[in-house]
Amino acid sequence: EAQVTQNPRYLITVTGKKLTVTCSQNMNHEYMSWYRQDPGLGLRQIYYSMNVEVTDKGDVPEGYKVSRKEKRNFPLILESPSPNQTSLYFCASSLREPSYEQYFGPGTRLTVT
Amino acid sequence: GENVEQHPSTLSVQEGDSAVIKCTYSDSASNYFPWYKQELGKRPQLIIDIRSNVGEKKDQRIAVTLNKTAKHFSLHITETQPEDSAVYFCAAFGAGNMLTFGGGTRLMVKP
């Protein structure tokens, strides 16, 4: 089954404790991205990757890191999480740039206390 | 960068009525405009999209119109049903390699 998976789905952590949210797709998509969703603000792009070893900042990259060592995986790293990073996070992928349909993962709800 | 504004933020309609959601964008280079539906607790899913060389596109009860001159596009849902209740997001893709989303519209269809 073609899909985008994310783990964990729910995470409660404390300020400053490094964490990683994994994202994987099995559709051989070149483009992958991370969004955060906050009420009234829609989906805001954090980072995106056009292909392996190619990543770029989105609209809200501060406090986040990503890597794209393999085509299927695109982990999101929070080196020192803060409460303002409490949000719902979605990973997405598309065949190439986002003028192709974006397929979203199930989401990760992160709470930083 | 691109800026997408979406209105209204909430919309309540009676079952069977039509619903219209409007978006404006700022970057005249934008050429692809998808609409996503997000049901409660679920992931966003593409429902319809339109490219800049087309003025209107229809798929059963949903349609999207694009006015490039005015830089706005709209989603039209006819004969609404309770299962249409969800949050709808418009988005625009342009010169950068990013999809910029509007703030979302919560549509409630009352039976």
Image (spheres, coloured by chain):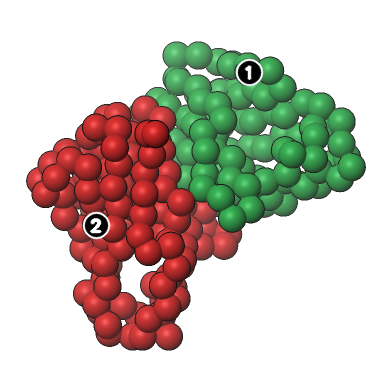
Chain colours: A red, B green
Q: Position of residue A84 (x, y in %)?
A: 41, 76
Quarter-of-image position of residue B64: top right
Q: Amino acid at mark 2?
A: Pro
Assign the N terminus of chain A to one quadrant of the image.
Answer: top left
Q: Tell me the crowding category of disc 2: few under 14, some 14 to 19, or many 20 or more residues within 10 angstroms, Cα based.
A: many
Q: Is residue B11 above or below residue B53?
A: below
Q: Secondary structure at mark 1?
A: strand
Residue B21 or residue A21, whichever sits in front: A21
Chain holding disc 1: B
Q: Position of residue B24 (x, y in %)?
A: 54, 38
For label 1, the residue is B59
- Residue at 67% x, 46% y: name it: B86
- Residue at 43% x, 85% y: name it: A113
Q: Amino acid at mark 1?
A: Asp
Chain holding disc 2: A
Q: Is residue B2 visible?
A: no
- Residue at 59% x, 40% y: name it: B37
For label 2, the residue is A75
Q: Position of residue A52 (x, y in %)?
A: 13, 42
Q: Is residue A22 visible?
A: yes
- Residue at 36% x, 85% y: name it: A14
Q: Is residue B2 above or below residue A13?
A: above
Alpha carbons under labels 1 and 2: distance apart: 35 Å
Apparent side of residue B71 relative to residue B32 in the rendered image (left or right) = right
Q: Tell me the crowding category of disc 1: few under 14, some 14 to 19, or many 20 or more residues within 10 angstroms, Cα based.
A: few
